[in-house]
Image (cartoon, helix red, strand yellow):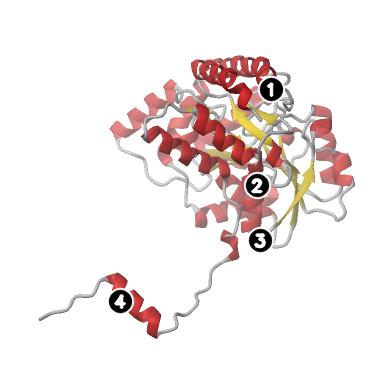
Amino acid sequence: MKFRFSEWALNDFFDQFFQPMTLKSSLRGAVAPFAVMDMLRTANAYTIRGRDIIHLELGEPGVPVPSGVQQAARHLMDQGLPGYTDSRGIEPLRTRIAAFYDQRYDLTVPPQDVFITTGSSGAFILAFLAAFDVGDRVALATPGYPAYRTILSSLGLTPVPVRVGPEDDYQLDVTHLQSLDQPVDGLLVASPSNPTGSMIPQHKLAMIAQHCRDNGIRLISDEIYHGISYDQPGETVRKHNHDAIIINSFSKYFAMPGWRLGWMIAPHDLGTAIERLAQNLYISTSSLGQHAALAAFDCLDELNAHVTTYARNRSLFLDALPEVGLPDIAKSSGAFYLYVALPETAQTSPDFCARLLDETGIATTPGTDFDPEQGTKFIRISYSAPTPQIKEAIKRLYAWKHNLS
C-alpha cells in the first residue's frame, strides 16, 4: 500500500520538527502602497459584479491611441515585429523627438542626447542611478507623485520633501531651497504637476535652474504633462540648464499610456553612464512601440483636440464641485487633475473615496497617495475621461451631495 502526502502535510511536518532558516529579504521593498492602484482593483471588482463605474482615479487619457499610431502598429505586426534596438532607442525616433523640441520650444537638442526609455518610470530609475549615489539627498515638492519617493527610497537615496501649499500654488521655488536645513544633491520638479495640475511660472523656473547651477545641485525635470496646459504653455528646463535631466513620456499628451514608452534628454556628462545602465537593466525598450510612436508626431491636431476636451471637462468640474460642497480646489493650470480639499466634517480621504465608490460608482484617489501627512483631507479627481462620463459623474455627485460629511 502506498502513502501519498500532500504538499501541505509535508510542509506542516517539517515546520513542527525542524526550525526553518530565516532568509534575508531586502528593505527596498518596504515602500508605501500605491493607493490609486488599490482603488482601481476595488473599482474593477465592482465592475465584475455588474456595477457601472466611472473611473476618475486613473492618471491616463480616456481617449483612443492616435489613429496614425494604430495604423503603424498594424503595419509592423503584418510585416513581422522588429527585434532588439540600440539601448538609446532607434535613431529615427530620437531624431524626431529632437525635431519636436525645435518645433515646440525653439530649442536645439542633439539626437545623441535623447534616450528612449521604458516609460517615464524607467527614465527616473536610469536618471537616479546615473546621477546619485546611495545616501544622496534629493528634494521634491509635497504633495507630489508618490513614485518619486518610492523609487528614490528603493534605490537607497533620501527623498527630502518640501512642503508646498495653495500659498505657493503647490510649487516650490528658490526660497524653499534656501530654507532647507541641509544641502541637497538633487532637485526634482514637475510642471504641470501631479496631483494638483499646478505649473511653475517661467521666471521662477529660470531662477530654480540658476540656483541649481550655482550650488552644484543636479536638476531633474518631469515634463510628462507638457502639451496639456490651459493658462500658459509648459517650458522645458533644458532652456535654462543644460546639465538638467529632462524626462517626458508618450503616456499623457500623446495618449499612449499602455505602451510604456518614454524619453529622457540627458546632459553630456551622464550620457555614457545612462547608456550602460540601460544596456544592462533593460537592453532596449519595446521595438514595436518605438517604431509606431514615430507616427504620433503626425497626429498633433488629433492630440490637441483631446486637450480641448480636457479643458471642457475641467470647466465642468470647476463649476460643479463648489455647488456640491467641494469649493476648495487647487489651481489647476495643466495636466488633467483637480486636487480637492474635503470638508472639515468629512471622513479621511481613503474612507471618503471608498464610500464614494461604494455609494455612487465614482472612483477617485485619496490624497494620502501624494501627501502621507496632510493628504487625509484631500482627494484627486482625474478629468481625462470622455465628457459624457464626466457629466454623469457630476450628476451622481449632485444626487449624493448631502452625504459629503
Q: Nearer the viewer, mark 3 or mark 1?
A: 1
Picture quarter with the N terminus: bottom left
**Which residue, given by chain and number where applicable, does mark 1 sit on?**
325
Q: What whole-number distance in Å separates the C-alpha atoms at marks 4 and 2?
A: 44 Å
Q: What whole-number distance in Å separates the C-alpha atoms at marks 4 and 3?
A: 39 Å
Q: Residue furthest bottom?
A: 17
Q: Nearer the viewer, mark 4 or mark 2?
A: 4
Q: Are marks 3 and 2 in contact (CB under 8 Å)?
A: no
Q: Is residue 396 left or right of residue 205?
A: left
Q: How many marks?
A: 4
Q: Residue at x 39, y 81 (%)?
A: 16
Q: Residue at x 54, y 52 (%)?
A: 278
Q: Is residue 59 visible?
A: no
**Which residue, given by chain and number where applicable, does mark 4 sit on?**
10
Q: Amino acid at mark 3?
A: Gly
Q: Amino acid at mark 4?
A: Leu
Q: Is residue 223 left or right of residue 344?
A: left
Check disc 2 and report its element: helix, strand or loop.
helix
The label number, if any, that marks residue 148 in the structure image:
2
First reached walking from the N terminus: tag 3 or tag 1: 3
Q: Are marks 4 and 2 in contact (CB under 8 Å)?
A: no
Q: Nearer the viewer, mark 1 or mark 4?
A: 1
